[in-house]
């Protein structure tokens, strides 16, 4: 053999070892990457499982609170004769967590004549501000029964306001 052939063989062996080391490094990095990915997937799955469990617990609690709460809110509405003005003024009676204010500024004097002193613009503004405060997406930090009550009140106030608008439009057409 010639000395050049030996060197070529050694260089080929060195190249082969370098390629093997490079390949091994790539495999190791890919394995580490897959392990990291596997770990992230496990964490995400645990998070999703926990969230689903929490949602199921909340659904059970909602189901238990909904029936009695609906009756309670309806009684409150009937007590105030389903009058949107009276309902807005006395909202703190049924939902004290969210309301300690008087939307029109004369809660103490609410009577039949007070309703006439409220303009449609004032009523609309108070109604919309109230809905923003009790909207189901806005009431955070409350217990499940309080959230259910907020949802029911939201629906009932919406119905009362629609009824008011319908009656007002009907009265305007007859005049």
Image (cartoon, rainbow, N blue to C red):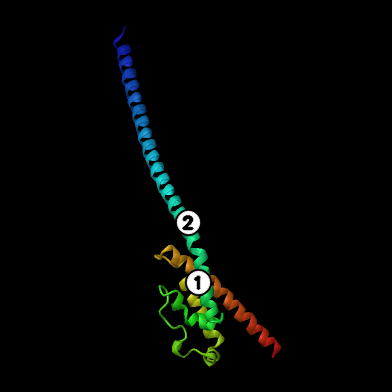
The residue under the point 40% across, 48% down is 47
Q: Nearer the viewer, residue 1 or 174?
A: 174
The answer to which quarter of the image holds residue 20 is top left
Vertical comparison of 62 with 172: above or below: above
Q: What is the secondary structure assignment of the residue under circle 2?
A: helix
Instruction: Using the rendered view, name the quadrant where residue 116 is placed.
Output: bottom right
Q: Residue at x 42, y 65 (%)?
A: 140
Vertical position of residue 121 compared to residue 47: above or below = below
Q: CA distance from mark 2 to mark 1?
A: 19 Å
User: How packed is label 1: few (under 14 Cα within 10 Å), some, or many (20 or more)?
Assistant: some
Quarter containing the N terminus: top left
Q: Earlier in the sequence, mark 2 or mark 1?
A: 2
Q: Is residue 127 above or below residue 31?
A: below
Q: Position of residue 124 (x, y in %)?
A: 54, 81
Q: Is residue 32 left or right of residue 134?
A: left
Location of the C terminus (image quadrant):
bottom right
Residue at 54% from the left image edge and 93% from the top image edge: 113
Q: Nearer the viewer, residue 161 or 90?
A: 90
* Residue at mark 2: 60
Q: Foreground mark, 2 or 1? A: 1
Look at mark 1 in the image and give the residue it sits on. Answer: 72
39 relative position to 131: left or right: left
């Amino acid at each position: 053999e010639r000395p050049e052939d030996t060197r070529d063989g050694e260089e080929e062996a060195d190249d082969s070892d370098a390629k093997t080391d490079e390949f091994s490094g790539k495999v190791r990095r890919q394995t580490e990457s897959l392990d990291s990915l596997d770990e992230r997937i496990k964490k995400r799955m645990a998070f999703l499982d926990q969230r689903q469990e929490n949602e199921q617990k909340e659904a059970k609690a909602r189901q238990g609170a909904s029936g009695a709460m609906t009756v309670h809110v309806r009684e409150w509405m009937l007590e105030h004769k389903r009058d949107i003005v009276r309902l807005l003024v006395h909202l703190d009676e049924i939902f004290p967590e969210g309301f300690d204010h008087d939307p029109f500024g004369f809660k103490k004097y609410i009577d039949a004549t007070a309703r006439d002193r409220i303009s449609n613009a004032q009523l609309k503004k108070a109604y919309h501000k109230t809905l923003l405060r009790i909207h189901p997406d806005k009431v955070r930090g409350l217990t499940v029964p309080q959230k259910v009550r907020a949802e029911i009140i939201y629906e009932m106030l919406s119905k009362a306001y629609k009824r008011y608008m319908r009656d007002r439009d009907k009265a305007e057409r007859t005049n």
